[in-house]
Amino acid sequence: MTISSSMNAGVAGLQVNAAKLGTIADNISNSSTYGYKRVEADFHSLVIGENSGSYTAGGVRATTKRLINERGPLVTTNNATDLAVRGRGMIPVAAAYEVENSGSFDELMLTTTGSFSPDENGYLRTDSGLVLLGWPADDSGTIPLVPRDTQDGLVPVQINPNLFQGKPTTSISLGVNLPATETEATGTGESQQLSVEYFDNLGKSESITIEFTPTIPATGASNEWTMTITDSAQDDALIGEYTVTFTDARVGGGTLASVTETTGGAYDATTGTIIVDVLGGPMEIDLGVLGGSGGLSQLSDVFAPLSISKDGSAVGNMTSIEVDANGFVHAFFDTGVKRTMYQIPLADMPNTNGLLAMDYQTYKPSPDSGAFFLWDAGDGPTGDIVAFAREESATDVAGELTDMIRTQRAYSTNAKVFQTVDEMLQETTNIKR
């Protein structure tokens, strides 16, 4: 019985070392595979039973596990949509064949790196057929509230390289100094004009003209102006008229004292804004708060538009896309405008090594991994997303070759046990002779 069990133990040793050699071969063959996670074989002894005066060899059993939590070094590339995770977390992807057929997906997969580029339909995908997933932004570039513990909010990232887009102007901020000398009794009464370009709902260039006319008193200084606003899109129709006064006190001299509307939206003293209606809709104009710096001022004898800022943009062509460290996908246009299109989250789970390994360095959640949660990259336990980068294989070739030598020696030794038991059985057979 003991001799037979020795042979069984030898056979088990051959089997487990063959299994370990298989993991080593897999690791070495994927030493140049981006994002590859090495496999490790562990041996566990088997105890069949021990009786007084006899011993039965149990042998050994091998289990394998993929060390998904181990990360390979990052290397730079020249593709803006080559992505790698620096730290904890995994990028959500889906099979391209699912997305191409329906524009959606059923099965969520995860990876730590990928070389993505637009296909003929604009989907960001790898050559191996993985489509990048993310949350779409609204027209303002804001990511709406989405569920974090499910894949329901994720959609395939689709970028149209021929995107032709503009954005209407909805707000303008004025930083203008009016000459204080013009509101004195000796003033000329000459008005000051300022033209500000804006973009309408169709991306066309229009302008509002703001005219400041001083109030000339009989004596002293009025510190008062009449501000009128006209819209070129409405044949220079009047869209707002206001009486603006400034303080001449020692503290806060030259700052806004009051804004009174004749026509147009009322002045909001809290925000320092008025709202007028251009042809395309309401437009907010920031004049500055009462007594505050910035906005309109009245100092010295110079009319000076110090700063004019506005939102909106002319229609332009998309020139490039990039992904930042927090996973936001930005589109850049030849007009200098940047628009947020998507956000790529990072998935994290309690046991990363419990994920189910699939082809092409992808993984699926399983009961062993625990439920996933989608974090903003760089938040919580997750690392950030690095663009222009790929993650190399986690295989240490020198370590694998060392393990190969050990495994070969262990295999040969178990074969020697098998050979020795065979010789002993042969001797037992010879006794009958």
Image (cartoon, grey):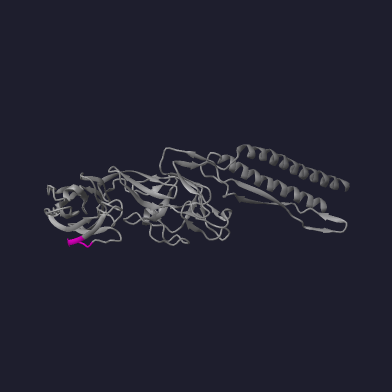
- In this view, the residue in front, 242 or 7, is 242
Q: In terms of depth relative to the viewer, which is nearer, 375 or 351?
A: 375
Which residue: 70% across, 40% down? 406
Task: Please state the horizontal and vertical placement of residue 197, each as a whole percent of the image.
Answer: 20, 48
- Front-lying residue, 166 or 42: 166
Left or right relative to 163: residue 301: left
Residue 263 magenta-drawn?
yes
**In the rendering, at what x and y percent does residue 276 appear?**
20, 59
Q: Residue at x 26, y 61 (%)?
A: 268
Along the horizontal axis of the image, is 375 left or right of 261? right
| Above or below 85: residue 54 | below
Q: Is residue 242 left or right of residue 49?
A: left
The structure residue drawn at horizontal position 48% and vertical position 42%, both measured from the top left corner, is 390
Report x, y in % for residue 343: 41, 53
* Residue nearest the viewer, comparing 409 with 35: 35
Number of marks present in the image shown? 0
Q: Can residue 176 be spotted in the picture?
A: yes
Segment tinted magenta in the rendering: 260-266
Q: Is residue 170 visible?
A: no
Q: Residue at x 79, y 52 (%)?
A: 4
Q: Quadrant of residue 55?
A: bottom right
